[in-house]
Amino acid sequence: MKKPDNLKRVIVDFKKLTPEILKLLVDKYPDGYDEDHIIEFRNAKNELIEAVEVTTDDTKYLVKVSTKLVKTMENYDEDDYEDFEDDDPDAVQDPIEPSEEQDDDF
């Protein structure tokens, strides 16, 4: 019988992703996550949610899977977040799609 943990459970959308949680994800899944890592569950609205799990000493984070998350993990550089607090949800910005990049070759 599995012993229940007393961890707080938090569902994290990309918009609320903090540098601390992003670092945990990159450390746990250095080559990215795959289907085997994804947990599926239904939220209070009975919507199917796909997430990957990372844990700290007191909290289990279920981070919603998205294209933005994949791109942000692929491009992770710890130095990008040195000017932010670990728990700042505004630090992690949407990745820029190649089609959105400005063309400076005038």
Image (cartoon, rainbow, N blue to C red):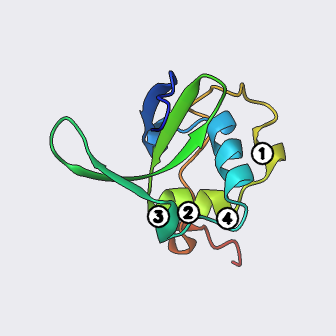
The quarter of the picture where the N terminus appears is top left
Q: Position of residue 53 (x, y in %)?
A: 52, 46
Asked if the residues shown at circle 3 and circle 2 are in contact, with their CB atoms under 8 angstroms apart, the answer is yes
Residue with the mark numbered 4:
74
Q: Position of residue 28 (x, y in %)?
A: 69, 52
Q: Amino acid at mark 3?
A: Thr
Asked if the residues shown at circle 4 and circle 2 are in contact, with their CB atoms under 8 angstroms apart, the answer is yes
- Relative height, residue 64 to residue 32 (above, below): above
Q: Which class describes the residues within 10 Å of circle 3: few (<14), some (14-19), or many (20+)?
A: few
Element type where label 4 sits in the image: helix
Where residue 87 sits, quadrant-wise, is top right
Residue with the mark numbered 1:
80
Name the residue located 50 percent from the left edge and 67 percent from the top edge: 36
Label whose residue precedes the other's in the sequence (1 or 3): 3
Residue with the mark numbered 2:
70
Q: Which class describes the residues within 10 Å of circle 1: few (<14), some (14-19), or many (20+)?
A: few
Asked if the residues shown at circle 4 and circle 3 are in contact, with their CB atoms under 8 angstroms apart, the answer is no
Residue with the mark numbered 3:
67
Q: Amino acid at mark 4?
A: Glu
Return the residue nearer the eye: 70 or 24: 24
Label whose residue precedes the other's in the sequence (4 or 3): 3
